Amino acid sequence: MSHDSTFTFSTPRMKVTDYVAHFLAERGVTAVFELSGGMITHLLDSVARHGKTRIVSTHHEQAAGFAADGYGRMTGIPGVALATSGPGATNLLTAIGSCYFDSTPAVFITGQVNRHEQKGQREIRQLGFQETDIVSMAGPVTKQARQILQEEELPAALAAAFQLATSGRPGPVLLDLPMDIQRAEIAVPQTTVPHSPPRPKIPGSHEFSQQLRTALAAASRPLVLVGGGVRAARCQELLERLVTQLGVPVVHSLMAVDVLPHGHALRVGMIGTYGNRWANLALQQADVVLVIGSRLDVRQTGSDTAAFSRGKTIFQVDCERGEMNNRVSGCVTLEATLPDYLSQTPESLVAVQCDKWRRKIEELRERWPDDAEHTGVSGIHPNRLMHQLSEVAQGASAFVVDVGQHQMWAAQSLRLRTSQRFLTSGGMGAMGFALPAAIGVVQSLPDHPCVVIAGDGGFQVNIQELETIRRNSWPIRMLVVNNNCHGMVRQFQESYFERRYQSTLVGYSAPGFSRIAEAYGIPGRRCSSPEELSACLRWLMDQPPGPRLLEVVIDTFLNAYPKVAFGCPLSEMEPLSSPVDMEST
């Protein structure tokens, strides 16, 4: 994942922002995302004149940041977003945090007031207009945040930002560029071609592998639990090679829905708070679990960690020491990047005989199908909606999913094919993610349609980006699952607040999304009956290329089931079980 560059300075000189434009193109950045502002006019002018990197103008800096997130996840090249000082920079913070928590490589470049206009150590709040200390604000949710203090620092700082964003556990880096530095001239560095060093031998890997091999040989109910770290490390093929060699069933977290395609013989399903019931039952019954790229947070294990660990030996591989033996203790751990581990490990492991266990999991799947958790659904069934969408969207490059109940139905029931991606905001859980993230996705694969799945609440957060999509005629197909409420919080209020629905139903409303789309110049339709659904979904994905929006109306009071009953073991899920404590997350 890491890249090394060495610099030797030569005599030609170049404006700082011209160098930034040259560097981005050299590193394969085909698009940057922004909302114009005074403190980035030099950057925009330079990138536009250079002509090798497309400037995608959004209508909100948060949207630009989420677009960079989508681009970085799809390509592995840092997504780049630009914003002016003050409100422009602070509007990026939610997207920066999303990149940080979900391990997305990204570089955020903010404009800043001239150095002589900065307050420095003065005991005042602000000197220059829109002067804001974005470095201090972004520090906790970046791998590094720094202001460039001298123009000569810029080339090395930019190279280091890209290296840091993609190395180890990927994440965002922020560079703050004062206006006077942007227009200064620097000596032009000559760069070597980035290269990856040989993979290092992993300390402790031999002992870890020996213990794992012994445990698997004695196991009768082994599982591999895959997390989002596999996609973040871009080693899905290595993971598939390992599990195929082992022959061990695989469960996955929300952030790893797309690691194995739906039809893979070893793929079990999603675990966690809203996981497939059969997958949670299998994980609870497992006796040996190999955890790869998952931090075992509360939404994966449930709040009862003692019940989660009981009766099983857990082996955990992660690139961050602090993520292991954190909430769930007693794990056998190995600190390693996943590409290093997965490229070196398979030779030391052998196939595991667990046919009886695999048949047992299939029996659980047949007993608890994902579309049988709801009985007596009035109108369109959300899980069956996802099944039907999967059939008509076989040519889609990605499903970009917002945050809410629809997110859980999609993760439970979408049937992804090989190479199709599933992108969502996991750690931050940011409503408004999907629509702008899809803008980043289509920059990576412009000839393939991308499907947005959003709820009525989340879609309104960045609805202004319909104009960006229409202006560029991108093949973004939008499915708005409209239950006329903030469904996930409404479900929370149903469980814990005696059905007092303040701000989820009371004080909330949504427009007619199909008509909103048409006002922006995007074809729109509305569907409210199961009989019309198949034809409407075919319309959504039909040729010709370009954007379309389908609004699908579902029952306001449908809950996302199954759901782990809070305070209970992972295997005890609503609606068959009831929570014994109030959720704190």
Image (spheres, rainbow, N blue to C red):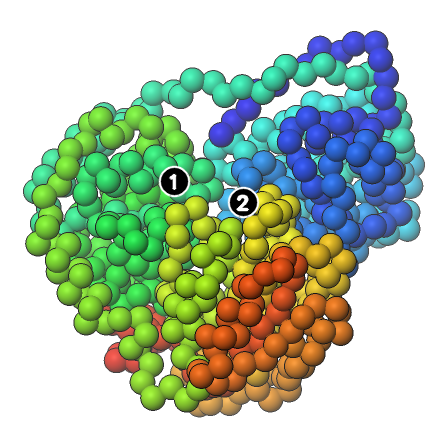
Which residue is rendered at x = 79% and y = 9% of the image?
Answer: 10
Give percent across and percent down for residue 570: 27, 65
Foreground residue among 449 and 140: 449
Foreground residue among 393 and 378: 393
Which residue is rendered at x = 37% and y = 65% of the image?
Answer: 412
Give percent across and percent down for residue 428: 54, 57
Dot 2 falls on a residue whose secondary structure is helix
Which residue is rendered at x = 85% and y = 31% of the image?
Answer: 181
Q: Is residue 384 left or right of residue 178?
A: left
Dot 1 falls on a residue whose secondary structure is helix
| Quadrant in which the C terminus appears | bottom left
**Residue flagged by tag 2: what amino acid is it?**
Arg
Q: Is residue 423 visible?
A: no
Give percent across and percent down for residue 244: 24, 40
Which residue is rendered at x = 59% and y = 66% of the image?
Answer: 478
Foreground residue among 222 and 355: 355
Q: Is residue 179 visible?
A: yes
**Residue flagged by tag 1: what amino acid is it?**
Gln
Give percent across and percent down for residue 171: 55, 41
Q: Is residue 162 left or right of residue 427?
A: right
Q: Which residue is mark 1?
A: 236
Badge 2 or badge 1: first in the primary sequence: 2
Q: Which residue is mark 2?
A: 73
Q: Is residue 273 left or right of residue 26?
A: left
